Amino acid sequence: MKFKTVGLIGKQAHQGANLSLKALIVYLTKRGCRVLVETKTAKELDKNGFESADIKEIGKQADLAIVVGGDGNMLGAARILAEFNVAVVGVNRGNLGFLTDINPDDFEPQLDSIFDGDYKIEQRFLLEVEVYRGGEIQSKDSAVNEVVIHHGKVAHMMEFEVYLDDNFVFSQRSDGLIVATPTGSTAYSLSGGGPILTPNLDALTLVPMFPHTLSSRPIVVDANSTVKLKVSPENTDNLQVSCDSHIVLTVLPGDEIIICKNPAKLSLIHPKDYNYFNVLRTKLGWGSKLY
């Protein structure tokens, strides 16, 4: 695949990200690419050698999107760009960088390989969440990492029931529930004691948050299942559903939350030497070969 029109999305008001964006504009211009810089990102740069466009226009017009920042920036862009089936690659200007592979200090050799067609492409699925009240939809959104139902107050328990394809699974009193994709299994779910799922698995993890019973454990389920959460009307406070910790949907006692696969997929571009287990060893501090 040839990348002729390239979109750039950057971490806001970040000096290192702006330096990388300026260098990328020079690099892409030399390669003869049409460069579209996301509108808010463009305000931080001298308007030279590029056009500005909102992220949906980038989705409609670009062959490739380069996100400069951390995993949070990648998640925000990915939720929108996945709708347009745009290939996405990340330049790491964040902390962990599970989703942003490219080294900002030495990006040219890696991007040269990608533009020359020597790369790996990987598709990650997203989740879609809908909140229903009295049988009518109130709000909806999507998530790359996870959907979390939680209390609006710290250390407050809530009551809810979990159904899988309309089969009752369990009821629970806890601080909430994390429903994570394989992509999100190394994020909030991991902090909650959930398992790491390799990205090729078609599975979800359901991770209880501080359940009021010692027998509650994370469970791995088929990603093609529909997860339904029935919030007990006995809850006395409003609750929330978070998507990737970015988007918050209001939930009232008695509401139902439906979580399923989003039909859109995120197409991630990786350098040719990318290896998922190398990423885990590096980011999580796992041991290297002994001999």
Image: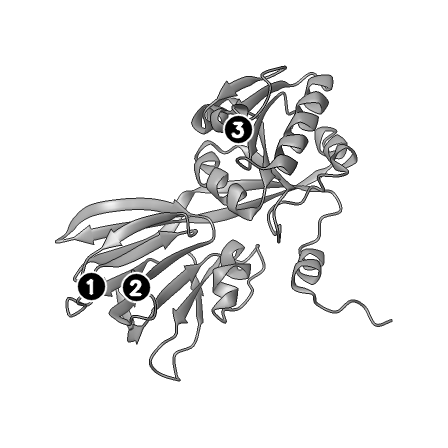
Label 3, secondary structure: give it: helix
Q: Which mark is residue 41?
A: 3
Amino acid type of disc 3? Thr
Please give the name of the residue rendered at 71% of the width and 59% of the height, measured from the top-left corner. 282
Residue shown at 49% from the left, 38% from the top: 77
In the displayed structure, 165 sits above or below 262; it is below
Classify residue 193 as left or right of residue 157.
Answer: right
Q: Are marks 3 and 1 in contact (CB under 8 Å)?
A: no
The three-letter code of the residue at mark 2 reads: Lys
Q: Secondary structure at mark 2?
A: loop
Q: What sort of colour scheme is used for the picture?
A: one colour
Extreme residue in the right direction? 291
Q: Residue at x 15, y 66 (%)?
A: 233
Q: Which residue is mark 1?
A: 237
Q: Residues within 10 Å of mark 2 (few under 14, many from 20)?
A: few
Q: Which label belongs to residue 179?
A: none
Q: Position of residue 176 (x, y in %)?
A: 34, 67
CA–CA distance between discs 3 and 1?
Answer: 38 Å
Tag 1 near tag 2, CB within 8 Å: yes
Relative to 187, does residue 88 appear above or below in the rendering?
above
How much space separates mark 2 and mark 3, taking CA atoms? 34 Å
